[in-house]
Amino acid sequence: MPVSAWIVAFAYDALAFVPQSLFGYYRDIHKNANFGLLGLLLLTAAVLMNGFMNLNVFLILTVLCLGNVLVHVEGAEATLRSSNGKMTPGAVFVGGGSFGVITGKLCSAFNVPFYFVVFVVVSAVPFVLLSNEIKCNAESCSGFNYAGKVNKYLVVVYSALIVIIRGYMGYGIPTSWNKTTVQHIIFYSAMGLGKCLGGVLIDRIGIRKTAILSIIGSIPFLLFGDRIMYLSIVGVAFFSMTMAITLALLVSVLPNKPGLAFGITTIGLFLGSAPIFFIKIKDFYYSCVMITVLSLLCMYMALKVVRNDDSD
Amino acid sequence: MTTAIEGVYFKDLLIPFIMISLFVAAVVLLTGWLVRKELKNEKNN
């Protein structure tokens, strides 16, 4: 990968993930702001600028990232505010991002023309309009009650740390099997399905059981999944379930600011995935130690702050 | 000294990395302050 592409990828992750907390907070306060349509407009503008104009790549990148931020925040707000305290909708929304990555990888692999990308972006307009229609006007997400009776600062800090660890493990675990476009698609599909399943399980069996199942269940698959795709994708899917847990915890302690809560998870994701740009552990022994220690740390933090499943 | 990506050297990335890090640090601090403010509001209510 040339240096310029490396920097663009790193800058994209920073600009597209990190500011979501601030825009989410703004959206929490200004409930009538229509971030969705504005975001799609900026995404379309970025694709057209890239296709037609010979502009600075960082200018296009900034417009693209801003569009991504606005659409993401709007989707999160609409989903969380209208889900009545259930985690399935929020988890499906975030899990859907993995399938967006797949679409992007396919567009890149087949070198599709930019007008096709514009078509993909514009195809989201009906969904944005629909989300405005079904959006609940509730003032808060008070139905979210997943945090235990512990200090709320502790819930925020531990949730953010779990997201950081998940971000690191999601991209940092050795997956030497993952080489072709099809394998990339399988990997991201497992990640997306795991995130979705996390929300479904929280609603079905409770957040504490989901935390135990997802973290303990993922360890053996992640440890021996470097060369064996089937083991690896099961591990990734299990560990990705923690996404729904952290989102549920953060919205529970910040019920009036779901956009801000959602933004904390995206910051954590960037902070977790950023080290991968510099150092990747390839040694089997060190990766085993890393996976085990980080998973157990996640387990400790999650069980410390989630509520008991049988409590009201 | 190379990075995790073949052919990419740390020295080539220093300035963009510092700029991005400053941006991220600023947003993280501001987010932390907003969370603290919000949790204080919740406690008072």
Image (tube, coloured by chain):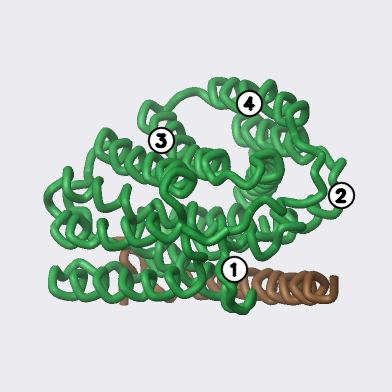
Chain colours: A green, B brown
Query: Mark 4 falls on what kind of element?
Result: loop
Residue A133, horizontal then vertical, whole percent: 77, 26
Give the mark toward the camera: 2 or 1. Answer: 2
Marks 2 and 1, how far apart in space?
28 Å
User: For the residue labelled by badge 2, is the local secondary structure a helix, a strand or a loop?
Assistant: loop
> How many marks are shown on the rendered structure?
4
At a point 65% along the width and 23% down the height, the residue shown is: A122
Disc 4 and disc 3 on one polypeptide chain = yes
Q: CA distance from mark 3 to mark 2?
A: 33 Å
Identify the residue shown where x is 45% and y is 39%: A101
As drawn, B30 above or below A84: below
- Nearer to us of marks 1 and 3 is 3
Placement of B18 over or under A39, stated as above or below: below
Q: Chain of mark 4?
A: A
Using the numbered discs, state the Cα–Cα distance from disc 1 to disc 3 in whole angstroms.
26 Å
Task: Name the one closer to the observer, A30 or A210.
Answer: A210
Chain letter, disc 1 residue: B
Residue assigned mark 3: A102
Which mark, by number, is residue A30?
Answer: 2
The three-letter code of the residue at mark 4 reads Ala
- Depth-wise, is mark 3 or mark 2 nearer the camera? 2
Instruction: Say yes or no: labels 1 and 4 on the same chain.
Output: no
Mark 1, residue position: B20
Judging depth in this view, the residue of A59 and A182 nearest the camera is: A182
In three-dimensional space, the C-alpha distance between marks 1 and 4, rounded to whole angstroms, equals 30 Å
Tag 2 or tag 3, which sits nearer the N-term?
Answer: 2
Q: Which residue is mark 4?
A: A124
